[in-house]
Amino acid sequence: MLPLRYPVVFNNLVISYYETQAGADAGDPSVEPALPQNYTNGNPYNDTIYVRIEDSTTGCYTTDSLDLEVIASPDANPAGPLEVCEQNNSGTAQFNLSQLNGTINNNPNVTITYHANQADANAGTPTVPVSYTTASTTVFARVEDNSLACYNTIGITLTVLEQPNLPSTISPLEQCDTEGDGTREFDLTSQEGAILANEATSGDFTVSYYASVQDRSNGNAIADPTLYENTGSPDTIYVLVEGSNGCSSTMNFDVIVNPLPSFNTPQVLATCDDAASDGVAQFDLSDATTQITGNNPNLNVSYYDTQAEADTGAPNDQLPIQYTNTGSPYNETIYVRIRNVNTDCYTTTSLDLEVNEAPSAIEPQPLVYCDDDNDGFGSFDLSSLDDQINNDPSVTITYHNVKVDADNGVRPLSIPFKNTVKDNQTIYVRVESPGVACYNTTTAALIVEQSPQPVQNLPALTACDPDGDGVAIFDLTEQEAAILANEANPGDFTVRYYPSQTDADNGTNEISVPGAYANDPNINPQTIYVVVEGLNGCTKQTSFELQVNPLPNITTPQQLELCDYNNPGDEREEFNLEDATLDITQGDKTIDITYHETQADADSGNKSLTSPYTNTSNNQTIYIRAEDVDTGCTVTQGYTLTLIVNPLPSPQVPSEPVEVCDTDNDGFEEFDLEEQIDII
């Protein structure tokens, strides 16, 4: 190709090319047509053509010659095919294309590039990297002269060789630690089937085993992989698999020595003898399983008649979970196989079976409750029956509403228990031995008895204190009728009296002579505690108070005196007796005063006198009765009122008038009447 397009106009210059000088000089197509832009030289390797350069404005031109030289392309020698093992079974591999350079062209004056296709190689771009990751393909090398940009190309086959296709993981080799030292011999070659499971033709591969990654790198394989003794657990084995094409893959697997199952030493499995009492009973072996495994879900437990059967573990030899000791009454030994469901390792032990007799359950005496409110229901302390039923402290006693609950040991009654059937109820008792479901049952009768209903809030017994020592004698039995007022048949009840609540509760220090009881002077009022007991032995309490009241505090009044104005000389006058009351009571309005003609009337409170009262004799003695209006206590002895009628005086009237001289003759004068007293 000529270096410029034809024709070329450049700064008004028209450039054209010709095979001859004459054609260039003529510049006329009729003489010689100009050469085309894409021109193939007519002479091999070297040729000369002519250039006409003409000014388009002036028509002036000049000519010159142009030598054409064809230079040979650089060599591109065949190379390859290049084969590389695939990476990670991906179907691709990384090719180092630069290793081909010396084969393709070792001239230092050329540049070699690689391209994905012929077109890219011809164009020189884009290139692929020298370290090229690809699947099997053909790439193209471009060999270019560094001076003249001449180039050559050649195709190169890249082949990805398959690696052994190994699984990412395989199951470990496992054995049970039967010797207890943590080591076993393993045949590592038994894993070859799993290692080459992805390959159709396992014979095309060689498998070797190594104890470490370093050993594998150094080619230090395990000498006899059929008798490999582990050094730890898990112990990792490193594998190298080589194919017939020279490609290899690696993987690893573990060898594991599993410990024998760990379990709880079996406890004696005991059950209760049935009604036959022959020492033969059904055992629920799952109870032993729970104890042996501690509910470990990884352990499987089965039971056998003999040690040999337990070692073999044949399913047909297994004992049923609901097992009856028909061959050995009361005591039998069976054998246990404990297997780890994850490792399949097992161990064996023995289990002792024991048939226990049921504990005794004696029907107790009826439990009686005295009903406070006589509604037929009461609260029972059922535990008070325990010793009557079975006094062995190791047994468990529970109480139930119905027999089926007692048999099943469910829904025990709470204590205290309130009966649900009025007046009388039968409940059921379960007596269970410790550690096993060995039990017996009986019944217990609950009886609700009616209790006395003594009257509460009784009125107090009161007495007056005549001598002021705070002590009075009380007849406590005066309260009995009031206490038993609620009872239709009072004679069916016994009434006892106590000085304190504690005594009443404990039945101690009963007042032995309740008809003549001297109160405690240090406690006023004093509470008396009463226990009423019926014929059925039921009791109930009430109480009342003893009150000792002081006598009215009065004084002896002054005598009442009147002048004998009414019918002078008869010494009879009308007296207002109440004039002495204030003097007697000193103003205490709680004291009521009455007056009487005789001591007997004052003592009895009869025939009280009313005012005005006409005395029956002079210097008459009136008897006073003083009564406390709150307590009723009276004073009648030692206090009297004297009524006196005084005679009128008898003066002598002077016979002569009293005369004085009128010094100023005005008719008035001052008299000294006292001078007449002696005369009068």
Image: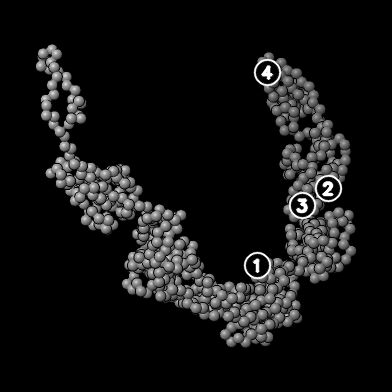
Q: Give the amino acid at mark 3.
A: Gln
**In the image, residue 611 lies at what x, y percent?**
19, 47
Residue for badge 3: 87
Is residue 43 found left or right of 497 in the rendered image? right
State how far apart marks 3 and 2 are (Cα): 23 Å
| Mark 3 secondary-structure assignment | loop
State how far apart marks 1 and 2 are (Cα): 72 Å
Residue for badge 4: 12
Q: Which mark is residue 295?
A: 1
Q: Is residue 515 above or below residue 10?
A: below
Binning the other alpha carbons within 10 Å of mark 1 as few (below 14), some (14 to 19) or many (20 upward) gives few
Question: Which of the 4 image quadrants contains residue 70?
Answer: top right
Sequence-earlier tag: 3 or 1: 3
Sequence-earlier tag: 3 or 2: 2
Report the front residue among 2 and 678. Answer: 678
Residue for badge 2: 79
Q: Give the amino acid at mark 2.
A: Ala
Binning the other alpha carbons within 10 Å of mark 3 as few (below 14), some (14 to 19) or many (20 upward) gives some
Binning the other alpha carbons within 10 Å of mark 4 as few (below 14), some (14 to 19) or many (20 upward) gives few
Report the front residue among 186 and 469. Answer: 469
Q: Which residue is drawn at 62% across and 73% down?
A: 394
Visual colour scheme: one colour
Whether the residues at callouts 1 and 2 have beta carbons within 8 Å, the answer is no
**In the image, residue 51 lies at what x, y percent?**
76, 24
Sequence-earlier tag: 1 or 4: 4
Q: Give the amino acid at mark 1.
A: Asn
